[in-house]
Image (cartoon, rainbow, N blue to C red):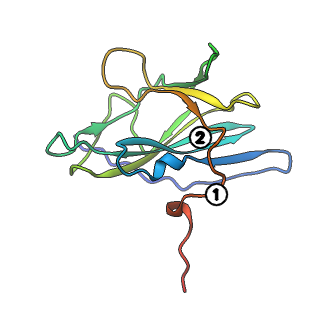
Amino acid sequence: MEVKIEKQIEVVRETKTSTKIKLYNPDALDHNLVHRMKSVEITDEYTRIDFIYRSSKVYINGGWIQMERDAYISPTGSSMKYRLVRAIGIPIAPIKHYFKNQGEYHTYSLIFPALPTGTERINIIEKEAPGTYFNFYGIDFSKWMTVPHPMDVAKSKN
């Protein structure tokens, strides 16, 4: 079964009292990585994490991806879990996004509740169980860049 994933138009609402920080992962520019975090956006209302995934070269069609409904983020060293609020560009299990080709790139975003002020290191957990899940531990974004990646900069119309 093929599932079509609609591209969502991003609407950003800001008030004069809200803060918004977007940090870009320098390692996201490393095209040798199969799965990497592109950026993290931290506001008073939510935490958004953007990912880049390259389909497998092991499977003829590149395989598939999905996200568990109970995915969460947690500040490293804390037992507090901030549950997934919304997934953009990746289906929630049991629905899968099937790739058409090996080495195909796919971007998606996960939205979580706001993290406590001053959080600099998190764990991103899809599911802690045997199997292949998208789990990232000890992600330190305190030294990530505030300068956008070249892939996020609008091209000139000159």
The residue closer to the viewer here, 41 or 70, is: 41
**Residue denoted by label 1:** 147
Nearest the eye: 33 or 82: 33
Residue 116 vs residue 150: left or right?
Answer: right
Left or right relative to 67: residue 86 = right
Q: Quadrant of residue 115?
A: top right
Q: Residue 29 carries which label?
A: none
Residue under pointer 2 = 48
Q: Which residue: 41% across, 51% down?
A: 6
15 in relation to 112, above or below: below
First in sequence, mark 1 or 2: give its number: 2
Q: Which amino acid does label 2 sit on?
A: Arg
Left or right, 50 with reference to 102: right
- Percent across and percent down for residue 92 are 40, 32
Closer to us: 62 or 23 = 23
**Disc 2 crowd, CA 10 A, few/some/many (<14, 14-19, 20+):** many
Secondary structure of the residue carrying tag 2 is strand
Q: What residue type is labelled 1?
A: Val
Residue located at (49% from left, 61% from top): 151
Q: What is the quadrant of the C terminus in the image?
A: bottom right
Residue 129: give x, y in percent of width and height.
Answer: 37, 14
Q: Position of residue 13 (x, y in %)?
A: 72, 52
